[in-house]
Image (spheres, helix red, strand yellow):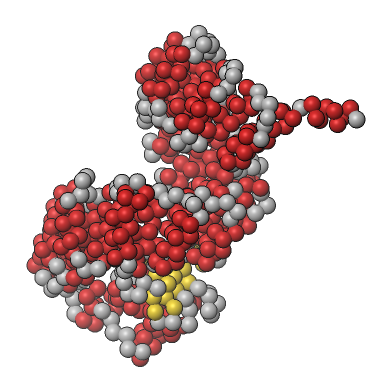
Amino acid sequence: MNLRGAFLANPRSLTTTAIAAAVRRGDLADAEEAFASTHRKTTATYNCLLAGYARAPGRLADARHLFDRIPSPDAVSYNTLLSCHFANGDVDGARKLFSAMPVRDVASWNTMVSGLSKNQAVEEAKAVFLAMPARNSVSWNAMVSGFACAGDMSAAEEWFRNAPEKEDAVLWTAMVSGYMDARNVVKAIEYFEAMPVRNLVSWNSVISGYVKNSHADDALRLFKTMVRDANVQPNASTLSSVLLGCSNLSALGFGQQIHQWSMKLPLSRGVTVGTSLVSMYCKCGDLSSACKLFGEMRRRDVIAWNAMLSGYAQHGDGKEAIKLFERMKDGGVKPNWITFVAVLTACIHTGLCDFGIRCFEGMQEFYGIEPRVDHYSCMVDLLCRAGMLERAVNLIRSMPFEPHPSAYGTILAACRVYKNLEFAEFAAGKLIEKDPHSAGAYVQLANIYAAAKQWDDVSRVRRWMKDNAVVKTPGYSWMEIKGMMHEFRSNDRLHPQIHLIHEKLAQLEERMKAMGYVPDLDFALHDVDESMKVQMLMRHSEKLAIAFGLISTAPGMTLRIFKNLRVCGDCHNAAKVISKIENREIILRDTTRFHHFRRGHCSCGDYW
């Protein structure tokens, strides 16, 4: 009876706990519902929901309204609202609130220092720090983090050396993150290895830093060490970084292992990990697994919807992307600007020009989303693929901001298809003007001249490249077999099984020609005789990877191949024929999209 009385006597603490639990798991709707059902609210009850608003972007007005309803706000109330102002970029509002606070504790000053630092006001943060009546390790950490975030690592080093508490993992992690952001991976690792104590955030900063700095293989290696040797339990942020690393490496096998392993953890049911898994499967070429996982997600935010939309778009399934877009809207999820990039990309890869134009024109009218440079670039691509080169060029010229170089690259690629030298020279000129040392524009212009058999112009472009010390990015393809990555370059002679690969290619060439395949010599871009051109085409990296996949896997198994450049037209034609001969699905990802080759056809419908 006494226990029952004690239980009934503390309903406020139970509802406050429920609000806090909902805030911790990121479910603000549940937190608001628990708050509304609490009849007797204390300041702590208000503070719990206020903390939820502080974590949620765009909820500053709600936070202010809630704060004004607190009968007796305490220091925690003021500090939480202060952090909410900073989280929403309202630095001026934070300054006014801080000045008006009836009482300030060390957390108030630390919130001010940290908030100013994170909002690029490091010198003002320094002035606040020097004015503090008392400081603790959090104060020093905020200053080191502020200078590191601002990219001033020499100042960060100085403050780090002067910090009185050197055993603090947060202090060391700020240096690791700062050097990773500065792309100084070696220095970041020096600090990481010298850390007297590490926490999960320390490990996460190195793993995410590796991925951001194109060291995804090191990120996966460190993750294994963290889980196996350091016995550190990962969180959603860890898994998101590792899965992004898998995507960057096209390491489907490792991504699948992470998926299976994460199923044992409660965080696998969260929207962050679920979205990262969907994105990984899409980018590694396994669209069916992504669809299955997306369908099983209990909760989806706009980021999850965008991941699935982008997956359909990159795999060229525009109709499914548009169906999903309609489902998203019907479900009450408000699209954002990234949603429309995904939808427009789906239209590009499926040839849905009219629908794409309607989406672009309706973004601002119906959703209040002003088109960004990404949307304009998509529209240029959409118009180019529909053959409307002049309209695409006019759109570039009428943009309200500087066009992204990719827009000129799109024009240049389209000029090769439609054999338009005038616009090709215009686009190449703009690209070279922006970056005279980037090889892409020179190579594409030379290829257009070569296709037109204007060999003198090809030579002129190559001399131009030499004069500007431009180095061409070599094309290569890769694939994962039994957990190992195999890489191929055109006319590769280094792979240990190259003789078996050439034998397989010779067999395929005979069977392909019997089925009507004729090598497209427009893609052999050298002034050599015809037989040499045919041989060069048969040794392209895509074909070498396909042949290797065929001799290394069981009959009927899907091949997943990745290329660092756009797939050439002859390899595209060859892959269609090979998929029919071998009765295999061949999934090939290049820089723009996935191509699914099945029974002699490609998912792009030759619209690429």
Q: Residue at x 44, y 10 (%)?
A: 131
Residue that protrudes farthest toward the top in the picture: 133
Tell me if I can see residue 101 in this picture: yes
Q: Is residue 174 left or right of residue 528?
A: right
- Residue 89 falls in which quadrant of the image? top left
Query: Considering the image in quadrants, where does the N terminus appear?
Result: top right
* 73, above or below 213, in the image: above
Residue that protrudes farthest toward the right in the picture: 1
* 569, above or below 360, in the image: below
Q: Residue at x 37, y 54 (%)?
A: 340
Question: In the image, residue 171 lies at what x, y percent?
Answer: 51, 26
Q: Is residue 466 left or right of residue 126?
A: left
Q: Residue at x 17, y 61 (%)?
A: 391
Question: In the image, residue 125 lies at what x, y percent?
Answer: 41, 19
Q: Residue at x 32, y 64 (%)?
A: 355
Query: Considering the image in quadrants, where does the C terminus appear?
Result: bottom left
Tell me if I can see residue 491 in this picture: no
Question: In the image, residue 10 lies at what x, y percent?
Answer: 76, 27
Residue that protrudes farthest toward the bottom in the picture: 514
Residue that protrudes farthest toward the front in the picture: 39
Name the one closer to the observer, 332 or 320: 332
Name the one closer to the observer, 464 or 357: 357
Name the one closer to the observer, 183 or 1: 1
* 434, above or below 60, in the image: below
**Number of marks in the image?**
0
Question: In the image, residue 462 lies at what x, y percent?
Answer: 15, 60
- Residue 319 falls in which quadrant of the image? bottom left
